[in-house]
Amino acid sequence: MSTTTSKLNDLIELLNDGENFYTEAAAKVKLPAYKNLFLRMATIKRAVSADLASHVAAHGGDVASGGTVFGSLRKMYADVRASMTKDSEAVYVAQLEQTEDRILEAFRDELNDDESLEVRRLAERHYPELKRAHDEMRDLKHRLAA
């Protein structure tokens, strides 16, 4: 597997974590506004992942189909915490914002990578949209905490 394919698959796994977590959270929250937000965020992750996957396939690589162990653990932790509180939306928002942190950090790291120009260009293309999604969840988390 080439460095480019490996790096893209690492990003895809993080995006898959985010998409899966948002989709599951949308199914578990009661308020339609949160459900719609979470589904919109899942769609963003899916679209970016699909773009990266097309580049992996173009290199003849196998596209990562799963997520990370850490992402699975974060979902389980959020589910347990949400089941123990009346404000499950706030729990999911806080945990999803941390997932956004991981995704954004990974893309930010690739912006400074000199090993693969293709990965850096893809990171540059998607970083603004991922940053907006991150900031939206961060701001929501802060509003809910206030």
Image (cartoon, helix red, strand yellow):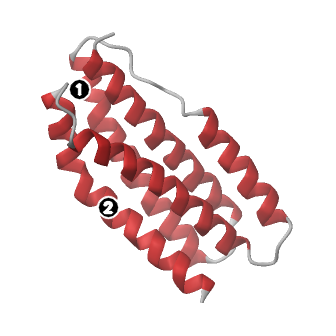
Secondary structure beneath label 2: helix
Tally the numbered discs. Answer: 2
Write the residue at 15% across / 30% down: 118
Q: Amino acid at mark 1?
A: His
Write the residue at 20% across / 39% down: 122
Q: Is residue 29 left or right of residue 127?
A: right
Q: Nearer the viewer, residue 44 or 132?
A: 132
- Tell me where residue 26 appears, x and y as whole percent: 60, 61
Secondary structure beneath label 1: helix
For marks 1 and 2 on the same chain, the one whose residue lies earlier in the sequence = 1
Q: Amino acid at mark 2?
A: Lys
Q: Is residue 143 left or right of residue 115?
A: right
Mark 1 in CB contact with mark 2 (< 8 angstroms)? no
Residue position marked by numbered label 1 in the rendering: 55
- Tell me where residue 84 appears, x and y as whole percent: 86, 67
- Tell me where residue 47 appears, x and y as whole percent: 33, 46
Q: Nearer the viewer, residue 108 or 125?
A: 108
Position of the C terminus by quadrant? bottom right
Neighbour tally class for label 2: few under 14, some 14-19, many 20 plus, Cα within 10 Å: some
Q: Is 113 drawn above or below residue 3 in the view shown?
A: below
Residue position marked by numbered label 2 in the rendering: 131
- How far is the residue under mark 1 from the one under mark 2? 22 Å
Write the residue at 79% across / 62% down: 81
Write the residue at 73% across / 71% down: 88
Nearer the viewer's eye, disc 1 or disc 2? 2
Residue 28's image quarter?
Answer: bottom right
Q: Is 1 drawn above or below residue 67 in the view shown?
A: above
